[in-house]
Image (tube, coloured by chain):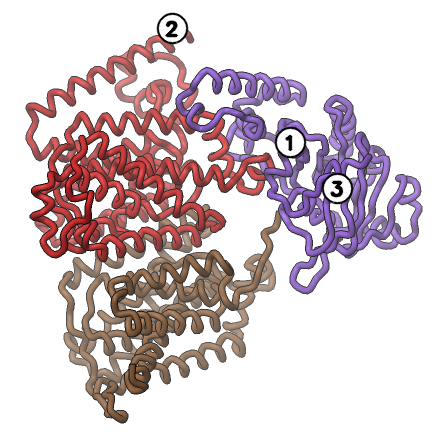
Amino acid sequence: MTLDLFLQHLSNGISLGSLYALIAIGYTMVYGVLRLINFAHGDIFMMATYFAFFGIVTFRIPWFITFPLVLVLTAALGMTVEAVAYRPIREAPKISILISAIGASFFLENLTIVLFGGVPKPFPAPTLFTDVVQVGTVAIQKLTFYIPIVTVLSLLALLYLINKTKTGMAMRAVSMDQETARVMGININHTIAFTFGLGSFLAAVGGIMWGMKFPQIQPLMGVIPGLKCFIAAVIGGIGNIGGAVIGGFILGIGEIMLVAFLPNLTGYRDAFAFVLLILILLSKPTGILGEKTAEKV
Amino acid sequence: MSLLKLEDITMWFGGVAALKNFNLELTPGEIVGLIGPNGAGKTTVFNIITGVYKPSRGQVFFKDQEITGMRPDLITKAGIARTFQNIRLFKGLSVLENVLIANHLHLKANYLTAILKLPGYWKEERMMREKSLALLERVGLADQRDELASALPYGLQRRLEIARALATNPQLLLLDEPAAGMNPKEADDLTEFIKEIQQEFDLTIFLIEHHMDVVLNISQRIFVLDYGMTIAKGKPEEVQNNPRVIEAYLGVDENVED
Amino acid sequence: MAAQKNNYRILTIVSLLLLLVFIGFAENHLDLYIVRILNVCAIYAILGMSMNLINGFTGLFSLGHAGFMAVGAYTTALLTIPPAIKAQIFYLAPLIKPLDQMNLPFPVALFVGGLLAAVVGGLIAAPTLRLKGDYLAIATLGFAEIIRVVFTNTQTITNGALGLKGIPALTNLWWSFGAAAFTLVVLLSLINSSYGRALKAIREDEIAAESMGIHLAKHKTLSFVIGAFFAGIGGGLLGNLLGTIDPKMFSFTFTFNILLIIVLGGMGSFSGSIISAFIVTIANEYLRFLDESIKVGMRSVVFSALLMFVVLFYRHGLMGANEFSWERLFGNKVYQKTLGRWTKRPRKGGYAG
C-alpha cells in the first residue's frame, strides 16, 4: 500500500470516527444520567437527516437556515422521546425501561417508513462541502476535513457547557448521585430532559454530516450506526465523554483499516464492532477510561 | 483449632482503604460481635469472608483451608452462610421457596434427572421439602410458607433470612445487623433466638450489630472497627470501657445509627 | 378439594383431546392459509417460551434469540433439503461435503438443529455471563448480529445472502403443536424443579443467590443452553414451514417480535407466552389491512406502539408471573361476572383478580 493510499484511508477513518464520536457522546451522556441505553438514539440521528431533507428539498429553505433548524428540531425530538418513553417508567425495573427504549426505537423507524416511505432518498448536500480537492495524488472531499473540525468544535463547546455552566454542573451531579442531586435542589426532570436534548443535538450534527458523506437516507439507516456508537461508548468507558470520543475513533479508523488491509473480510465489516465489544467486555468491562465501581452489597 | 482465620487483610477501594491489616480468629462454638461506626468497614469484612470481594492483601482460612477470593457459592458450600444488611430475600418467591433454594447446593441429581423427574430426584426433592418445612416450623414461619417473602412483616423477613442461611447447613453464620430497625422487645426476642439456634445447629456466629444491648448480651468477644482499623478487641466489658471505643463509637452511636 | 382437583384433571384431559381432534380436523379440512397461521402461532409459542426461560425466569436480558433461531433453521433446512435441490440452490459456490449429500428425517434434523443452537447458546453464554442488564443485552444482540454476518458470508455452507430455497414443507400442525407441547412440558418441569427455583433465585437477586450456594455461571449457562435449544427447534420448524430462509430474516426485528410476545404474555409465565403468541400472530394477520389500506409499515407502527403501551401501562402483561390454571380461570372476576353466572361456581376463587 502506498503512503498516499494509506493517508486517504486514514483521513476517511478519522472522519468516520468523528461521526461515530458525535453519536457516541449522546449514548454516554444519557447512560451517565439514567444508566440506560437509549436504544432510540440511532433513530433520532436518522430523523435528523430526514429533517434536513425536508427543509432543503421540500421547503426549499437554504441550507444555512435548515441546518440550525434541524439541530433544534432533533433536540426537541430527543426530549419528546424521553418524556414519552422513559420518564413515566423511570422507577420501573430496568428490563421494562430497556423494553420501552426498544419500543421507542422501532416506533420511530416504522413511523418514518409510513410517513416518508421505505425507499432511500438522496441527501441534498450543498456542493460547498462535497467538492473534491486534490492533495498530492489523491482526491479527497472537502467534507473529510470539515468533519473532524466540526467535531472538535462541538466537543469543545460541550466540554465548556458541562464543566463551566450551571446546567452542566447539574448534569454531572445527577450522573453521580441522583438522590443527592435532588436534595441539593436540582430539578432532575429538567436535567435529564436537557441531557437528552443535548445528546440529540450532537446526533443531529453527526447526522447532517453523515448525510453529506453517505448521501442516501432511509428509515433504517440509524440502526447499525446506533449500535456501533453505543459500542464505541462502551469501549471508551460508558459515562465518560472523552471515552466516547476515543471509542468512536478506534471504531471508525479500525473499520476502515480492516477493509483496507484485509479486503477479504469486507463482508465482516459490520461484525467488527461487535467482536471488538465482546473483547473489551471480557478484558476490561469498564472500557478504556471507565472507572471501576464495586457493587454495594 | 480455629474455624475461621483472617490474616492481615487489607482492602482498597480506589484510593481509600476500607480495611487495614485486619486480623481475626474464630474458634468453633463462639459468638463474636463486630461493631464500629457506619463506614468503618464491617460489611467489607463479611464480603471478604464470603468471597464477594477479593482482598487487596491478606488471606482467609476456613477450617485451615485457604478460601481467599474463592467463588461465593463454593464458600457457602464449604460451610459459611450469611444474611445481608439490607435484607436480600427472593422477594417475588414464596417463603418456602426461599428456604428450598438454599437447599439447592446439596442437590445431587443433575438437571436432566430433575427435568425427567426420575425417582432419584423425587426422593431428594421430598427430603428438601421436609427439611425446609421443619426449619420453617422451627423459626415460626410455617403458617406463612406460601406467602410471598415480600409480604412478610419486617421482623419476619429478618427471621426468614436467617432460616434461609441455616438451610445451607453452615458451620459459621455471619449476621449483618440482624436487629436493625427493631424495637427493644423485638431485639430481645432476636437475641434469644440467635442463642437458641447457635446451640441447636451447633454454629459459630459472627455478627455485625448496632444495637449495643444485643451485642453486649450475646457476644463472648467483640471487635471494634473504625476507619478500617481494629481499635479494640476483647470481652464485652473490656471493650465497653475502652476509651478509644467510647470516643470513636459509643459516644456518637445513637446519632449516627440509621 | 380432592373432587375439585379431579374435576379439573378431567377438564384438562378433555381439553387436550379436543385440541387433538381440532388439529386432526384442521390439518385435513381447513384452508391452507389458516393452517399456516396456526403453525406460525405454535412456532412463536415455542420461541416465546424459550426466550421467556432466559429473560423472564432467569432475569437475563438477552437479545440474541434470532441468532439461535437462525442456527436451528439453517441446520434443519440443510439436513432436509434433497441433494438434487441443494445442487441447484448453491449455484454461486457449491455446498461443502458432506452436507451436500446429507438428507435426514425431519425430527432428527430438528433435534440436530436444536443441539447446534444449544451449543451456540453455550458458547455465547460463556463470555457474556459476567455482564448485567444492558451490557448483556447489547453483547447478546452483538452475538446474534455476528451470527447473521457470518451466515451472510459463508457462501459454501449457508449460500450467503441468497439464502436457502426449496426447503421441503415438512412442518405440519402435528409437528408444530407437538413441539410446542414438548417445549411446554420440559420447561415447566425444569422450572418446577430445584434447578428452576435456582434460576428464579438468580432473577430475584443474583448476589443473594450466589451466597446461597448457587453456581451462577453454571445455572445461567443452563438457562441459555436450554433456551437456545428450543429456539433452534422453533427456527427449524419455521424454515421448513416457509420454504425459504435468508440471513436478513433473522435480524433484530425478529428478536423484537418475540420480545413483544413475552412482554405481552408476562415475563415469567409460559402459558402467558403461548396465549400471547397466538394473539400477536393472529393480530398480525388480522391487521394486514392496515398495511394494505393505509400504508405499508402501519402494522409495525401499531406493534411497536403496542409494546410501549404494554410496558408503560401494563407492565406485568396478561399473566404476570402466573401460569394458567382452571382455578385461576374460574376464580377470575371477569369470568364470574359473565359466564360464571350460568354455571355453578366451582369454588371460591383463591386467585381472583
Q: Which chain, by letter, is brown?
A: A
Nearer to the camera, A193 or C49: C49
User: Are tags 2 and 3 found on a single chain?
Assistant: no
Q: Quadrant of the C terminus of chain C?
A: top left
Question: B101 above or below C203?
Answer: above
Q: Quadrant of the N terminus of chain C?
A: top left
The residue depicted at 51 percent of the width and 72 percent of the height is: A168
Indicate the amino acid at tag 3.
Ile
Q: Chain of mark 2?
A: C
Badge 2 element: helix
The residue depicted at 92 percent of the width and 52 percent of the height is: B243
Is the residue under label 1 in contact with that under label 2 (CB below 8 Å)?
A: no
Alpha-carbon span between mark 2 and mark 3: 52 Å
Residue B179 image offset from top left, x and y in percent: 73, 36
Tell me the crowding category of disc 1: few under 14, some 14 to 19, or many 20 or more residues within 10 angstroms, Cα based: many
Question: C326 above or below B163?
Answer: above
Q: Which mark is residue C3?
A: 2
Where does label 1 land, which residue?
B165
The residue depicted at 8 percent of the width and 50 percent of the height is: C293
Where does label 3 land, which residue?
B208
Alpha-carbon span between mark 2 and mark 1: 39 Å
